[in-house]
Image: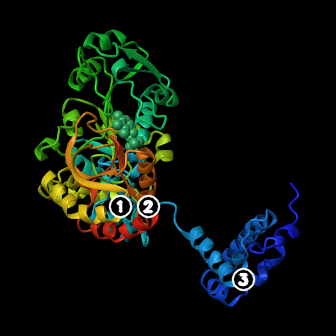
Amino acid sequence: MNARPDESVVHGSKASAKDLPSVDRLIRSPASAALLAEHGHTLVAGEARALLDALRAQALAGELPAAAVQPAALDAALRARIETRLAPRMRRVLNLTGTVIHTNLGRALLAEPALQHLLAMMAGPNNLEYDLAGGGRGDRDAIVEELLCTITGAQAATVVNNNAAAVLLTIAALARGKEVIVSRGELVEIGGAFRMPDVMAAAGATLVEVGTTNRTHAHDYERAITERTALLMKVHTSNYAVQGFTSSVDEAEIARIAHAQGLPMATDLGSGALVDLAAYGLPHEPLPQEKLAAGCDVVSFSGDKLLGGPQAGLIVGTKDAVGRIRKFPMKRALRMSKLPLAALEATLRLYLRPERLAQDLPALRLLTRPEPQIRALAQQLAPAVAQALAPRFTVEVAAMQGQIGSGSLPVERLPSAGLAIAPAQKKGAGRALDELAAALRALPLPVIGRIADDRLLLDLRCLEETRDVQPFLAQLTHLEATTP
Ligand SMILES: *Cc1c(COP(=O)(O)O)cnc(C)c1O
């Protein structure tokens, strides 16, 4: 389509491409001078060019309002473009989904000491791989190995990027070119294309499935062992539960079978809480220390699930098995960076004072937050939210069922409370809810809730009084403007 610039002039309120200044003239206007001084020529000129290109296209289509080419409007548009360009893509949000360790929302929050240590260590040089006592080259594993051994009772420990990497590395180091025996009931998919059979193939090992989906017995493992077998493995079915007529073989039994043939046994624990959650009134999640005591040679687990630290894959076990894993060349490609390593060290140190853990570790603090406290907060916030959303929506305090998240204890629910927001009118209710959810996501500090039973639910378990309540309330006025 050939748009003719002259044509748009016919409509009095439209501007033509000829009304637009050159890039040079735009960035030399008095208002832009401040932008130039602040951001420099490269960014300002680049955004000015992009802005004028966009406006020119609008003008040629006869859709550019005359007001848009006024100097003040052009300056404002340029400033807005620059602000958008400089705004980070990764943003803080309020997780009101009711899922505490939410993979899509960044999993575990770091504890204050971990944040402080991370910042302090990144601001200058550090002894990442330097032995301060001897004055020579050190090993980055040494920063956390002793701590991990103290906490889990392991002989040795090493760390990599995440637990997926830990599993891949364990299999590759112990069983490349050989066979690994796993129960059919444990061939998990974790999400994000992490499927046990594929990981096995990527590690260069051959998967030998034993048993059935619901039942696997000790003799299934025993019969599958051949001279090609290198490893027996158990995978914690962290994101689903097999119920009913089931039978599986525990770690102690598999380890006994493996050791009788001189083979190692590894467990992928997934979440790996380091303290017994039952002591906090939560469901028991298996601990690495229990699995090591049962005879596992290697136990791997995540750093940013129930452990409450940064993304990391922790590998604990015997000196021999962990030594082979550490020396395997792939370890160098999967090694942890200094950033999460600093945060991991500080997080693990919190476990030396278990009595304080429920205060110090955000993951545990949120998981153990008493329901009456959450309900009281909901009652306190309900009137302000109701006022901001009236008359289109009604707001009430409601009981809710949260989740731990990140594939931990998938069938357990956390009794919680929050705000249930319902459209005032039945007609168009679905659309109204979608629009409200979008308006909440568009807030300066985006609020992520969930829609269920024709209501938008804001579970307040993860809305912390000291950090979140004030910003949450302060931005409600934006909602009055954005919801019609
Ligand atoms: C979460 C999980 C993983 C992957 O851990 P990441 O730290 O996310 O890489 C592997 N195995 C199991 C059983 C898990 O639950």
Of helix, strand and loop, which one carries label 1? helix
Residue for point 13% across, 47% down: 280
Read off the residue under disc 2. 483
Residue for point 79% across, 77% down: 20
Q: Crowding near pointer 3: few (<14 within 10 Å), some, many (20+)?
A: many
Q: Amino acid at mark 2?
A: Thr
Quadrant (top left/top right/bottom left/bottom right) for the N terminus: bottom right
Read off the residue under disc 1. 389
The quarter of the picture where residue 175 lies is top left
Of callouts 2 and 3, the N-terminal one: 3
40 left or right of 274 in image: right
Mark 1–mark 2 contact, CB under 8 Å?
yes
140 left or right of 371 in image: right
Seen in the picture, residue 230 relative to 71 is either above or below; the reply is above
Seen in the picture, residue 466 relative to 264 is either above or below; the reply is below
Q: Position of residue 14 (x, y in %)?
A: 76, 72
Q: Position of residue 154 (x, y in %)?
A: 24, 41
In this view, the residue in front, 344 or 458, is 458
Asked whether residue 433 appears in the rendered view, the answer is: yes
Of helix, strand and loop, which one carries label 2? loop
Cα separation, mark 1 vs mark 2, equals: 7 Å
The quarter of the picture where residue 110 lies is bottom left
Read off the residue under disc 3. 27
Of helix, strand and loop, which one carries label 3? helix
Mark 3–mark 1 contact, CB under 8 Å?
no
Q: Amino acid at mark 1?
A: Leu
Cα separation, mark 2 vs mark 3, equals: 36 Å
Closer to the eye: label 2 or 3: 2
Of callouts 3 and 1, the N-terminal one: 3
Q: Amino acid at mark 3?
A: Ile
Cα separation, mark 3 vs mark 1, equals: 42 Å
Label 3 within 8 A of ligand 1 by Cβ: no
